[in-house]
Image (tube, rainbow, N blue to C red):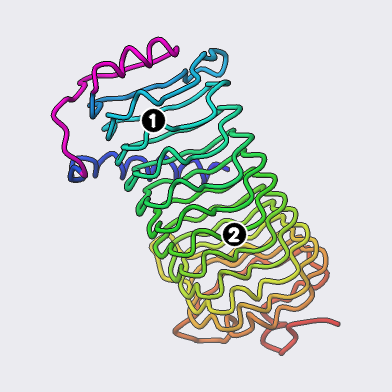
Amino acid sequence: MKKLLLATLAMLAIACSSDDETKDLYECNNVYVGDVVLRSQAEVDAFAANDYCSVQGNMVIGSKNDDELSDIVSLVRLMSLKGVKGNLDIANNPQLESLEGLNNMVEVFQFNISNNAVLKNLQGLKSLVHLGAFTLEKLPLLTSLEGLENVKKIEVLSIAYNEKLISLQGFKNLTYSYLTQIHDNDALLTLKGAEQLKEVAYLQVYRNRSIADFEGIEGVSKIMEVVISENDGLLSLEGLHNLHSIELLTITDNKLLQSIKGLRGLTQFEFISSGNQLTINENESLESLEGLENVNRFKGYLEIYDNEKLKDFCAIKQMFVPDSNNFDVSATIFSNPYSPTWEDFQAGNCSQP
């Protein structure tokens, strides 16, 4: 997943460079300047006694080291806190059941909630509006995202390793997320809950064993890159049907994926300097490329290989028209039951029974 790591680093750099341009969303006259680490309940209570409304630095509640667990059970005394200008980590708190106490928190630059074994919900975050980066990771009792209803913008969103999370329910007002990574959530059934999401540059959905389709993100119409990989229960791409423009698309190793008809709204792979790329490989159940028949502009690289049942390529035959101003395709097609060549497309042989 080198591509995923590079994308994450790039987006974080963008978020960092734009931080100074973000206007305050709240008033605060009692600012803590510097970094603060609260490793115990006693330290949380002592810090809270100062009634700080903002931290001008980084804040850790618990520990960033998985081997150092805190005894923190409550954040209720942090009600005065409205924002953190740096990173806020709430991590490795095995007794923390709730985020109540952060009810007045409006803005955090980078917010990481991870490895809190009994955290059941995010209800304490109902005032949050803007997040530079937001990570929800290793929260085994979390079943939904309810509590995030007022969040409108997240630069970098990562949701991973949450064993019982079943949907994105809670993101009622989220309209923008530059990079969205959703991976390794074993119980995730659907992306429903993010229906207001309109603007996404990078969408990466991988290793979610139970997700069946992409219903819930129908509002996205244009995107730079989509990665759909190793989702063992994925049956279709329904939910992406309003997507009409893309630069890079990777669909790989989705064992039960039977159809990509959910891409039927896709009309063009927008030109970028490094070239566009469409990769479809190792999808054991895919028999047809139906869903790509409306693509009327593609200039770049096409790679389709190791799909055990794929015999019908007729949905992309328009890409192989000689001397077309809209198509300039470098194609690598192999190790499918039928792998047509340029000559096959020219002869009208785009499928086999």
- Residue 68 locus on image (x, y percent): 53, 12
- Residue 91 locus on image (x, y percent): 49, 25
What's the distance in space between the residues labelled 2 and 1, CA to CA?
42 Å
Asked whether disc 2 touches disc 1, contact meaning CB atoms under 8 Å apart, the reply is: no
Q: Which residue is mark 2?
A: 250
Q: Residue at 46% across / 67% down in the picture? A: 220
**Direction from residue 348 to residue 42 in the image, left or right:** left
Circle 2: residue type: Thr
Q: Residues within 10 Å of mark 2 (few under 14, many from 20)?
A: some
Disc number placed over residue 142 in the picture, else none: none
Q: Residue at 63% across / 36% down in the picture? A: 141
- Residue 15 locus on image (x, y percent): 31, 43
Element type at marker 1? loop
Q: Which residue is mark 1?
A: 101
**Direction from residue 236 to residue 88 in the image, left or right:** left
**Magenta stretch bounds:** 25-51
Q: Residues within 10 Å of mark 1 (few under 14, many from 20)?
A: some
**Res. 322 image quadrant:** bottom right
Residue 33 within the segment the image draws in magenta: yes
**Direction from residue 114 to residue 308 in the image, left or right:** right
Q: Residue at 53% across / 24% down in the picture? A: 96
**Res. 18 image quadrant:** top left
- Quadrant the N terminus occupies: top right
Q: Residue at 80% across / 61% down in the picture? A: 284
Element type at marker 2? strand
- Residue 193 locus on image (x, y percent): 52, 58
Compared to 166, does 121 lie above or below?
Answer: above
Circle 1: residue type: Gly
Residue farthest to the left, as pictured: 29
Residue 13 within the segment the image draws in magenta: no
Compared to 212, does 136 lie above or below?
Answer: above
Residue farthest to the right, as pictured: 353
